[in-house]
Image (cartoon, helix red, strand yellow):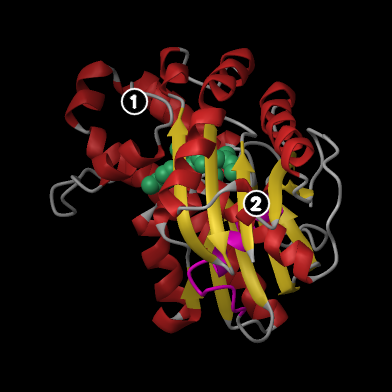
Amino acid sequence: MVTLGIESSCDETSVALLRDGVVLSSLTHSQGEHALYGGVVPEVASRAHLEKIDGLARRVMEEAGIVPSGIDLIAVTDSPGLAGALLVGVSFALGMHAAHGIPVTGVNHLEGHICSLFIDNGGRQSAGPLLVLLASGGHTAVYKYASFGDCELLGCTVDDAAGEAFDKVGKLLGFPYPAGRAIEEEAAKAESSKRPEITFPVARFSSPGKPCCFSFSGLKTAVKNFILSKGEDYINNNRPALCSAFQKAVVDSLAGNMEAAARSLGIKTAAAAGGVACNGFLREELARRFGEGNVFFPRPSLCTDNGAMIAMAGQMMRQNSRLRFPSMDPGRGI
Ligand code: KG4
Ligand code: ZN
């Protein structure tokens, strides 16, 4: 089964072709325009999607050697996301549907991130429930994933997402948007022997009603106050140590909640998806707590927003008789 996946919910225009859970071709255009503003500007995003989507779709089909009549399903992100940005992808998908008579389904972006876990496995799913961390620029949540369609939200952030924290702290430190990767690279330069002792606090939830909740806005304020109190020279001389302390605080919170949830539910296998799951320090920490063979991740290009994960979700929706006509709902969760 060949599925065309289209993703345009935020600042990545991405189109991919999958055959039975295996990527045939995949192209992503990351919109550099937003670096100028330090964050995503919705109207700029919509216009950039409009400029790129047609060319990306043509090239993806060329690279895979597939023509529209060879496509069995079009899967397009229709929620959640920026309204104008979603509209571009959905309109393009409906245009192809109308022109070529290819069945089309709307896909929830968060479900897409979770389905990215199954792409490298060729569509096979692990046995038993899986504890999934979804950490991106827009969302941070923990799910108990039993099977497709049986995915329970255990907790999420009450304010900023983990990736948003990376981006906001990056902005304070002068890194261009998005800053997650740059912070990780800067943190890697910190030599543990020489680095000053910097630690940042992270909110913990002890109430039983919030087993896996996160909060990162206080951490951002703590970093901001630290920068103001130390002054420019100190920050310029200790940027790697500062990035390392910030990264550690975020990763401790993410991995700590995952470990606590796994223990209380008796789940042995974990996974992480979303842009923040590119982070090597987070991967190492989850592997340390769960054991090397008990945790898995999509490859980095499938962690950040991409059309392949949307195609994978579409394929799984079809296999589970859950196809639905796209209906834009920018605020819908899973
Ligand atoms: O999944 P994604 O592409 O978009 C959303 O759905 O939000 O995630 C983008 C986020 C950004 O906040 C970016 O800074 C973060 O993922 N990110 C990282 C890394 N690479 C990307 N955060 C930490 N470490 C990284 N290596
Ligand atoms: Zn995303």
Where the N terminus falls, by quadrant?
bottom right
Q: Can residue 329 be seen in this view?
A: yes
Tell me which label, 2 or 1, sits earlier in the chain: 2
Q: Position of residue 209 (x, y in %)?
A: 83, 59
Q: Residue at label 1? A: 175
C-alpha separation, residue under disc 2 versus residue under disc 1: 45 Å
Q: Which amino acid does label 2 sit on?
A: Ser
Q: Where is residue 215 in the image (x, y as percent from the top left)?
A: 63, 44
Question: Considering the numbered disc 1 on the image, is that residue within a helix, a strand or a loop?
Answer: loop
Q: Which residue is drawn at 56% across and 48% down?
A: 67
Nearest the eye: 205 or 49: 49
Left or right of 280 in this view: 66 = right
Vertical relation: 50 (above or below) 281? above
Q: Position of residue 30 (x, y in %)?
A: 45, 31
Vertical relation: 105 (above or below) 147? above
Q: Which residue is drawn at 42% across and 59% down?
A: 282
Q: Position of residue 40 (x, y in %)?
A: 55, 22
The part of the chain drawn in magenta is: 110-125
Q: Which amino acid does label 1 sit on?
A: Phe
Nearest the eye: 222 or 174: 174
Label disc, if present, on residue 121 of the rendered structure: none
**Is residue 252 found inside the magenta-colored segment of the image?**
no
Label disc, if present, on residue 69 of the rendered structure: 2
